[in-house]
Amino acid sequence: MKKLAVFTEGQTEQLFVQSLLRSVSNTSNIALRLSRMSGGRRYTRIEMQLSSDPTNDETTHYIQVVDCGTDGRVISDVNERYEGLHSAGFDTIIAVRDVRPDFSYADIRKLRETMESALRHDQIVPVLVLATMEVEAWFLAELSHFAKVDTNITPARVLIDLGIDLANAPIEQFPKPADNLIAIYNLEGQSYDKSKEAVERTLRCLDYNELNNGWLARTPSLAPLVKECRRFLT
């Protein structure tokens, strides 16, 4: 059984990773376990299981997706769990976090260098994925999903009403992609926030068949995550 551990900074990233893995998998014999970390500093770090698929003799891929609760804990949680994961037979580790709000677009190269040097890489070399500037940029780049949120929301309408050319604009350089997503949804009175319900509604509208039809080209920071998930699931 192949084993993958993904550490995300928050719930939105965790839900997206889960959705991506289930969508790009060409097998039904996968089992996902979702959990959330809490505590730290003065309190013991605690992991709470959120959901877990049953495993059996036919399970070929086992995946843990851990919500670290904050961007500042992603690297430390990977390092603290590293030995245990290796001992348990995990062969792939992915760390996912946003760039904002603590860093700017100009900081990305230095941020990556700092984080990669801090990650343990003895037996397993973790893959660091920086959502630029935040995970909502990845949602903005999947152009077909807007009409599924509301049939009157299209890239053409966004260009006319908001002056944003989603097909050609440098989406990953938008300072606050979540705010752009909110403004677009609001064109027809739809809403978006970080709640589980709102995020899952957007995820249901995403078409992962679009990954190779311009989606990845518009948000290259998503490419390493997709590549690693596909490689693991092959």
Image (cartoon, rainbow, N blue to C red):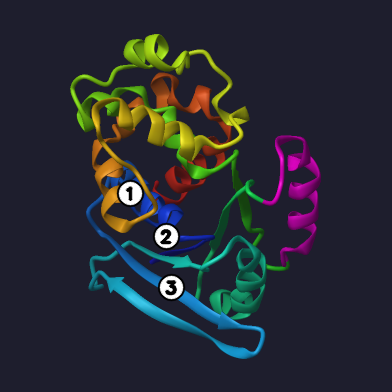
Name the foreground residue: 100 vs 59.
100
The residue shown at (47%, 37%) is 179
The residue range painted magenta reads 102-121
Question: Is 110 colored magenta in this rendering?
Answer: yes
Q: Is residue 152 above or below residue 1?
A: above
How far apart marks 2 and 1 lie (CA) works out to 9 Å
**Element at label 3:** strand
Q: Quadrant of residue 154?
A: top left
**Element at label 1:** helix
Say if mark 3 contacts mark 2, CB within 8 Å.
yes
Name the foreground residue: 19 vs 62.
19
Q: Position of residue 37 (x, y in %)?
A: 49, 76
Q: Earlier in the sequence, mark 3 or mark 2?
A: 2
- Residue 43 appears left or right of 156: right
The residue shown at (28%, 72%) is 52
Q: Position of residue 191 (x, y in %)?
A: 30, 40
User: Hey, what amino acid is under mark 1?
Assistant: Val
Say if mark 3 contacts mark 1, CB within 8 Å.
no
How far apart marks 3 and 2 lie (CA) works out to 8 Å
Name the foreground residue: 148 vs 55.
148
Q: Is residue 77 above or below residue 21?
A: below
Residue receiving disc 3: 36
The residue shown at (23%, 32%) is 149
Say if mark 2 contacts mark 1, CB within 8 Å.
yes
